[in-house]
Image (spheres, grey):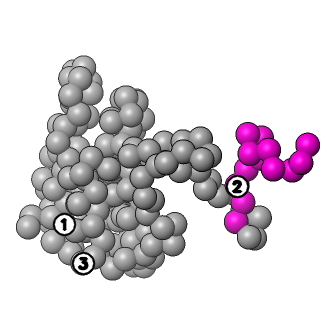
């Protein structure tokens, strides 16, 4: 074996941590090495809220909730203090929508429920213009749709009232 058998070895960062460098499809699923995928969100992207929210919304509107998740996750991981749970919840809503698009209703319900539960405490005083009340309503409707067997994926949520 020549050591470059990518079917059995994992991509690694310079420090040895695993890194999946394979191209991805529009829903974030890995494609075979050498395939042409969609541009990815950089792993180290950490935007402030006023940049993260509109970018994530564009990805949601373009049918790319996995990318929206990556943007929101970067803001979550960079956040400190009281907003951290909000960003975690927003990222979970986006990845839950990703699971709906991928045809995984059980995973979708789990993540959308977690996301809803993380953002719900911010309902009384939502920071950064996040539309917490309507996002909670969206999450409840999406969960209800799965439980009722509604085959259509709901339209993407609006992250802000703008």
Residue 86, placed above or below residue 98: below
Q: Residue furthest left?
A: 162
| Res. 70 in view | yes
Q: Residue furthest top?
A: 149
Q: Which residue is mark 2?
A: 11
Bin the neighbour count of mark 1 within 10 Å (Cα to Cα): few under 14, some 14-19, many 20 and up: many
Q: Residue at image x 12%, y 53%?
A: 134
Q: Residue at image x 52%, y 66%?
A: 43
| Res. 115 in view | no
Residue 98, placed above or below residue 47: above
- Nearest the camera: 14 or 71? 14
Residue 12 in the figure: left or right of residue 125: right
Pick whichever of labels 3 and 1 is earlier in the sequence. Answer: 3
Give the structural element (helix, strand or loop) at label 3: helix
* Residue 153, image quadrant: top left
Q: Which residue is mark 3?
A: 50
**Contact flag, marks 2 and 1 (Cβ < 8 Å):** no
Which residues are drawn in magenta? 1-13
């Amino acid at each position: 074996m020549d050591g470059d058998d990518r079917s059995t070895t994992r991509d690694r960062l310079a420090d040895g941590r695993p890194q999946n460098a394979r191209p991805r499809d529009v829903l974030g699923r890995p494609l075979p090495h050498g395939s042409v995928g969609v541009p990815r969100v950089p792993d180290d992207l950490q935007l402030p809220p006023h940049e993260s929210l509109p970018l994530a919304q564009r990805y949601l509107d373009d049918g790319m909730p996995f990318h929206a998740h990556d943007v929101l996750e970067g803001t979550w991981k960079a956040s400190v203090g009281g907003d951290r749970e909000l960003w975690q919840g927003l990222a979970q809503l986006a990845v839950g929508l990703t699971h709906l698009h991928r045809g995984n209703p059980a995973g979708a319900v789990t993540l959308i429920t977690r996301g809803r539960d993380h953002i719900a405490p911010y309902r009384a005083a939502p920071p950064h213009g996040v539309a917490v009340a309507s996002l909670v309503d969206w999450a409840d409707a999406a969960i209800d749709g799965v439980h009722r067997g509604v085959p259509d994926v709901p339209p993407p949520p609006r992250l802000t009232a703008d």
